[in-house]
Image: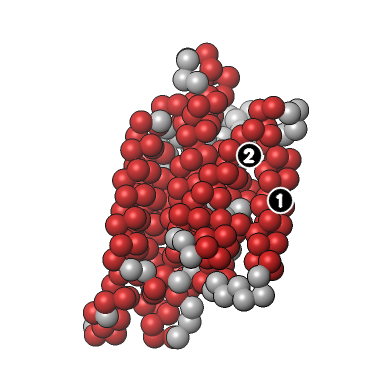
């Protein structure tokens, strides 16, 4: 069993594991709402929209985490403003802000010939370089995500399934939508240290989507997604150690592979032939109608 435990005896691998576990919890909370509301494009745009802040922070010698967070907040506020103050759909606003923020980031990167930021780490993650103070930041992000999810749960459920009912119940859907955007922003900013911005969907989307095929309640999806994300982190770091592959990319690939396994198993479950029943009368139907799967918030 030494091959299973030896990698995590090394301090930087152990820190990477803890970072992955914290990010998995944060992404499970935010990713569940992304999956239920169909906000995957927003999450993708948010992750790429961090580039201007990261590039500017690197040029000025500041914190890449703070720069990325500020840029993601600007992106979220911009999407909200375009959607609210114009007749454009949210997808259009997201697409416009996505291109604008990405273009601005490329301009900043190309501004100085001596620009030396490690874009590979930004795009694909550098989980093995996580420092102890980064763990404190990720822990704070997980606690904050849990608090927002708990306080806004009722409004988020109404917003995800019936926005008009949310307004009728006085749950302030616009404020709930803004809070949900903040939760997604928090998860994306926390994740780029582990899997990078290009692979952030590996932990944000895949585990909740895999659990949504089986769980009947939102808390069950969140809990199961956290478990799947943690399993992907552990297995990915272990495989990366023994195979010499990129750690963040391996974690993301395993998370997506778990989704496909879950989807395959769900497909086999749904395709099982029903038992043939002899009709009691000639007018009886050949098979009983399938019972719809119940879903409880």
Image x and y of residue 144, in percent: 35, 43
Figure check: 202 above or below 171: below
Cβ–Cβ below 8 Å for labels 1 and 2?
A: yes
Q: Residues within 10 Å of mark 1 (few under 14, many from 20)?
A: some
| Residue closer to the observer: 51 or 89 | 51
- Numbered-mark total: 2
The answer to which of marks 1 and 2 sits earlier in the sequence is 2
Give me the residue at 64% from left, 39% from top: 79
Residue plotted at (65% across, 62% down) = 108
Query: Which residue corresponds to the image point at 60% horizontal and 45% vertical from the top-left?
Result: 75
Q: Is residue 49 visible?
A: yes
Q: Which residue is mark 2?
A: 78
Q: Quadrant of the C terminus?
A: top left
- Residue 149, given in percent of the width and then of the height, sits at 38, 37
To which residue does mark 1 refer?
Answer: 100
Q: Secondary structure at mark 1?
A: helix
């Amino acid at each position: 069993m030494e091959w299973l435990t030896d990698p995590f005896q090394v301090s930087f691998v152990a820190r990477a594991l803890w970072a992955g576990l914290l990010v998995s919890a944060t992404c499970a909370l935010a990713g569940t709402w992304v999956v239920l509301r169909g906000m995957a494009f927003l999450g993708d745009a948010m992750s790429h929209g961090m580039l201007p802040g990261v590039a500017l922070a690197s040029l000025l010698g500041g914190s890449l985490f703070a720069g990325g967070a500020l840029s993601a907040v600007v992106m979220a506020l911009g999407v909200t403003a375009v959607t609210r103050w114009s007749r454009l759909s949210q997808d259009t606003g997201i697409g416009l802000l996505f291109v604008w923020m990405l273009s601005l980031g490329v301009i900043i990167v190309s501004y100085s010939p001596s620009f030396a930021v490690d874009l590979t780490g930004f795009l694909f993650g550098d989980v093995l370089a996580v420092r102890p103070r980064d763990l404190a930041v990720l822990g704070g992000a997980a606690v904050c995500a849990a608090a927002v999810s708990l306080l806004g749960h009722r409004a988020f459920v109404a917003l995800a399934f019936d926005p008009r009912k949310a307004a009728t119940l006085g749950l302030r859907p616009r404020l709930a939508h803004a809070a949900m955007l903040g939760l997604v922003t928090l998860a994306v900013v926390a994740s780029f240290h582990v899997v990078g911005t290009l692979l952030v969907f590996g932990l944000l989307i895949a585990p909740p989507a895999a659990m949504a095929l089986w769980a009947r309640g939102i808390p069950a999806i969140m809990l199961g997604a956290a478990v799947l994300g943690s399993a992907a982190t552990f297995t990915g770091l272990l495989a990366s150690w023994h195979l010499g592959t990129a750690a963040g990319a391996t974690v993301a690939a395993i998370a997506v592979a778990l989704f496909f396994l879950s989807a395959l198993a769900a497909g086999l479950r749904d395709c099982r032939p029903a038992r043939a029943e002899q009709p009691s009368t000639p007018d009886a139907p050949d098979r009983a109608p399938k019972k719809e799967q119940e879903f409880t918030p």
